[in-house]
Amino acid sequence: VYNHCDVSMPFTAIDHDYWFHHEPKDRVWSWGPEWNYNHYDPKYDVWPARKYIGESIMYMINEFHIDGIRFDAATQIANDEFLKIIVDQAKELAQK
């Protein structure tokens, strides 16, 4: 799923605070580190989590012709703008 991952995900060891929210919003409902779709890195002019997840989704659409993506508890994603961007990109790619 693309709104959280397991604590053993390699990015948590590489640089947790670069990729994920520092603290879960609600510890009772936390399923592991949540991707931080609000983090922008001006040094590299990139939204790292958006880019990583977006490229992963586009790869699966292009290579495996998937027709859906699972986002558990989508209402808990802090940035719903990212979801719209991904949907628009996926629709465009699927039409090619």
Image (cartoon, rainbow, N blue to C red):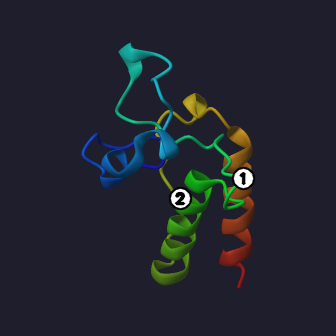
Query: Mark 2 — residue?
Result: 53
What percent of the width, then of the height, locates residue 5?
A: 36, 44
Viewer-proximal residue among 51 and 28:
51
Name the residue: 72% across, 60% down: 45
Q: Residues within 10 Å of mark 1 (few under 14, many from 20)?
A: few
What percent of the width, then of the height, locates residue 13?
A: 31, 47
Name the residue: 57% across, 71% down: 58
**Of the numbered discs in the image, which one, if any, rests on residue 93?**
none
Q: Amino acid at mark 2?
A: Ile
Q: In the visual, does 18 lie left or right of 51?
A: left
**Of the numbered discs in the image, which one, if any, rests on residue 42?**
1
The answer for how far apart the CA atoms under marks 2 and 1 are is 19 Å
Q: Give the mark count.
A: 2
What percent of the width, then of the height, locates residue 44?
A: 67, 61
Q: Amino acid at mark 1?
A: Pro
Q: Quadrant of residue 95?
A: bottom right
Q: In the visual, does 17 lie left or right of 78?
A: left
The relative height of residue 81 versus residue 90 in the rendered view (above or below) is above
